[in-house]
Image: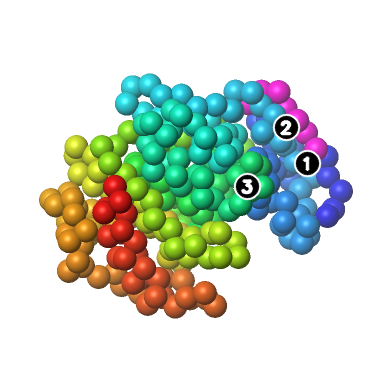
Amino acid sequence: MYDFHFVKPASVADAVKALAQEEARPVSGGQTLIPTLKQRLAQPSALVDLTAVPELVGIEAAGGAVTIKGATTHAAVAASETVQNAIPALAHLAAHIGDPQVRNRGTIGGSVANNDPAACYPSAVLGLGATVLTNKREIAADDYFQGMFTTALEEGEIVTGVRFPIPEKANYQKFVQPASRFALTGVFVAKFSGGARVAVTGASEGGVFRWEEAEAALSSNWSPDAVESLSVSADGMIRDIHGSPEYRAHLVKVLTKRAVAAA
């Protein structure tokens, strides 16, 4: 690693001020940033620790939604009775991210801000039509994700939380890449009174996306059979040593059916 200053702000306002320094970077769990620093692929002048900010930690349910603060760990989400009772699919998703070490360090805000194309949380945010909360504004999930490792966040903007509407039904199915525990492909489905949402992670070169054909079919008939006649194009799907684009396209349909059946 290169030398850098480590800053532990006590409030969001202090964090924003610290991030105004040239080449300062936020760290919230560090599951991606720390390995990047170890490989000397980044050289920040300062790391601003968001996990020490009390107002960025916590979970609450109100007004038909569950709000999870940005520095809340995956383990805390998985263990939360509030999440388990309101959106069990979200608690299940958090419980199967990485391994215990990752779950006890990684945070929802860090995952959503990083927007790794194989991360689990982006599929829940998009699949539930959540709202990403920042120190400046509220961003709808459909406007937030803008491609691989790319979001609507501006310079110095911090994810302070995510507000998830409570669905009638939901489920997440992940085909795990054994070494990393990332999703080779993952599908989050949710049923609301106004229709269904289906979000896919791990499959596309563009990152998380909605499978709108399946949403239309499931909105009319919430059943695994509703997507039986549908197919997913392999165009734009990831090709690597773990799977071909065609394989990932096939997994999207298989996992969607499984998620609807489980929900």
Give me the disc on residue 18: 2
Whether tag 2 and tag 1 are in contact, CB under 8 A, the answer is: yes
The residue that disc 1 covers is: 46
Q: Magenta span covers which residues? A: 6-13
Say whether residue 41 is visible: yes
CA separation in Å, label 2 and label 1: 8 Å
Q: Going 47% across and 75% down the picture, which residue do you hit?
A: 243
CA separation in Å, label 3 and label 1: 28 Å
Q: Quadrant of the N terminus?
A: bottom right
Residue 85 in which image quadrant: top left
Pinpoint residue 106: horizontal percent, then vertical percent. Answer: 62, 44
Instruction: Tell me the kind of residue under disc 1.
Output: Ala
The residue that disc 3 covers is: 100
User: Taking 73 as reference, is 198 above or below it?
Assistant: below
User: Taking 230 as reference, is 22 above or below it?
Assistant: above
Asked whether 91 falls inside the magenta stretch, the response is no
Of marks 3 and 1, the one in the foreground = 3
Helix, strand or loop at label 2? It is: helix
N-terminal-most mark, 2 or 1: 2
User: Taking 236 as reference, is 84 above or below it?
Assistant: above
Neighbor class of circle 3 (other Cα within 10 Å; few <14, some 14-19, many 20+) is few
Instruction: Tell me the kind of residue under disc 2.
Output: Ala
Pinpoint residue 112: horizontal percent, then vertical percent. Answer: 52, 45
Determine the residue located farthest toward the left in the rendered image: 220
